[in-house]
Amino acid sequence: MTAVPMPVDSMAKVDLLLGQAIMLAPDHWDDTTATLHEAMGIALLMAAQHPTGEPVDLPDVNQQNVLGFVEQALREVQSWDLALAADLPDLARLRVLLADVRRALVAAARQG
Amino acid sequence: MWEAVRREFTRLHWDAEPPFTQDLMADWTQTVHRLMAIRRAMGPVPDDDPVALLATATMGAARVREVRSIVAPSLQGVDAALADVARALVARPDDVDRQGETWTLNQVAYELVHWVRVQAPDDRAGAWLQAGETALDSAIHGTASRSTMSAGLAAWQEALAAVQPVHETAIVRRSVALGHLMLLREAQAMVSEGRDRGMLPASYAEAALDNLRGLARAHHATLRQIDGRQLGTSRVDQAVMLKVGAAVRQITTRDGAETPDARLAGLLRSGFGQAIVVGNLLEQPSARTATEALGRLTLEYVANPSILRPVGPSGAGDGGRPTPRAPAPVWEAAPTPPSTQPSIQPGTVLDGAAVQERCRARDFGVAAATADPANPPELLRGIDLSRWPQLVADGRQAVTDLVASVIPMAYAQTRGLTNAEDLRGQMFVELMGAAYRFDPSIIGPERWPMYAWMTVKHTLWRGVDDYGVVRKRIRGPRPTAVSMDQWDPPSTNPGPSDIIEERDSISVLARAVEQLPTSLRGPLEESMRGSSTRAIAESVGYSESTARRRLHEARELVKAELAGVEGNHRGHEFVPDPVLDRAQRLFEESFGPVSAPERRHGPAR
């Protein structure tokens, strides 16, 4: 067990951000959506395992698109101490998935 | 054996003036308990067993709010007949044709749940009962092997049943919608793959895909109605969300050994993750068409399972597709390890600091397991409630480690004795008790091995009789235990295989104890710590006979669990597993006499 405090507020934020991203994601399911859903599954479980007592605020929630939410979630996850990996077995997987989704969304945006 | 049940069925259908019940769901819940008792009598019950699924579906139906009590013919006659069947099965377990009886049980349960569903006027309760009926229907018309997917879907159904009383809470609705959305995406991927590889007829697959997308759109609409920033949670919500999250993670975790058709079959049998029940919980009008269509597709598959043509993992049309990467394993509760295995090699010498640290973890664990969250003891002040389960797990781990560090003593002291197995079992129990009792502040942490040694010697001194029962303390001379062949063993140290077996036995046994309900685990653990039945009764505030009965029940359950684990591991091959055999033996021979509470006779006339 590590002594690193669990970033429960940040986890709740990631859960909400990915929820927003899924809400805005297109109805057709492709590989990117699949990856996003898997990340959501991890975030959902993490948030349930480590609940926060504080309400979480998402700024500019109406002005962001899927990529914006994913990027914000990725930043949050990347701010977590890597020593948490001992307590969060899916941490690395979540980082990888979010990075993949972001890369795919950026590529899609460039292609127009 | 089933004759009385058959007679009661007939009475249920044809009796002109049957006895009535005011609350059919209450009666039905009782009947399902009976069905489960019969199922348990036939062996361990996996989560995705059809009768277990019927039980969770019934729980969901019973939890639907604002459903009027249903006045209907009473099921009490059927109940009584089923209770007789359960008793008969328990009485002569060796004479039972398990496969045949399971088959009969599924048929009986199917007919009963159908009868109850027809009587239930409420659509939401009916949808739950339909889920149970479909599970049984599937088992009857096409048996399927267990799969990761089916186990995950069973967990999902259980989570939905837990959601039922709090489904109006925004955060819970959000979790269910998101969870089902992920499940639908998984289903979409599987159905697409099934269509592309020729496993499903194109028309069936297209209809399924259309409705999966339609339901996903409805879930999107539900999510848009929920403002994520305004979500608050209660403790109940958190517990429910944890169940939902764990189930979803299990479903979306791909098991490399699981074939696509096994995953697809699991999804189809589950009514695509109980779509109708989810639709009812979320109350999204736009979901209705899609959920009903998915329900129809499920029934179509159940009635004709051959529409899904199995294709092996390397079958035609595979196209060299890479095996999906398996994500990290799901841990149900934060960093709780899946089982209590010693984290050290048996016989590892722990220095004073290590013993001290483990004793502290043990004390935290015991406190967390027994404390009242509303009024935590000093030791737990300032520790978030969500961490308590982890403290309990850490405490158990610490005790397991303490025992593992000294377990070779038991071998050294018993090697060559005629009743070595019995003695070792008893020593293990006594060492567990010692690990709980040991107080480093009085004795000194570095003296744990000495304390354990004294415990082992004491057990040896007391000894066990030919039946593995601890002898009563007597002052008279005790016959000396001698080895059968009168020779000293070449070494007093246990061999490597003995150590490995012993370590695994400890963990199997500890896991079985851990799975007991709190009301039974508490007395058993007290007993393992060396408390007398009277002391246990006093500490928890019930009579001595009740304490004795609970101890007996706990021991029986652990015994059954060990037998069940053994059965699961063996499968159909009947290969003896030394670890499980040993754990079973350890339990049977050392947890104290497994005897039923004494039958009380009235005074002689």
Image: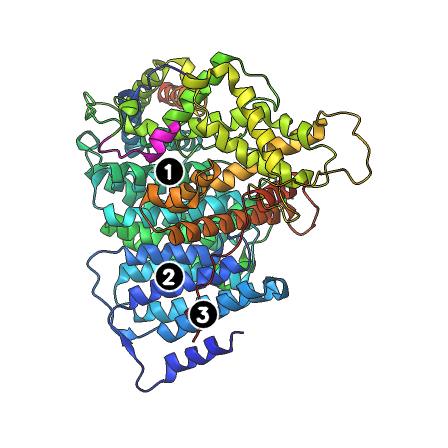
**Residue B312 image-quadrant placement:** top right
How far apart are the alpha carbons under marks 3 and 1?
Answer: 50 Å
Q: Are marks 2 and 1 on the same chain?
A: no
Q: Nearer the viewer, mark 2 or mark 1?
A: 2
Q: Secondary structure at mark 1?
A: loop
Q: Nearer the viewer, mark 3 or mark 1?
A: 3
- Residue type beneath disc 2: Gln
Asked if the stretch drawn in magenta spans residue B374, the answer is: yes
For label 3, the residue is B82
For label 1, the residue is A28
* Label 1 Cα neighbours within 10 Å, binned few <14 / some 14-19 / many ≥20: few
Chain letter belonging to callout 3:
B
Q: Name the spot of residue B1 as percent of width and height, x first.
A: 54, 74
Q: Name the spot of residue A69 as percent of width and height, x first.
A: 29, 23
For label 2, the residue is B130
* Label 2 Cα neighbours within 10 Å, binned few <14 / some 14-19 / many ≥20: many
Q: Are marks 3 and 1 in contact (CB under 8 Å)?
A: no
Please give the range of residues in magenta: B365-375
- The extreme bottom residue here reads B16
Which of B443 and B270 lies nearest the eye of the viewer?
B443
- The extreme left residue here reads B230
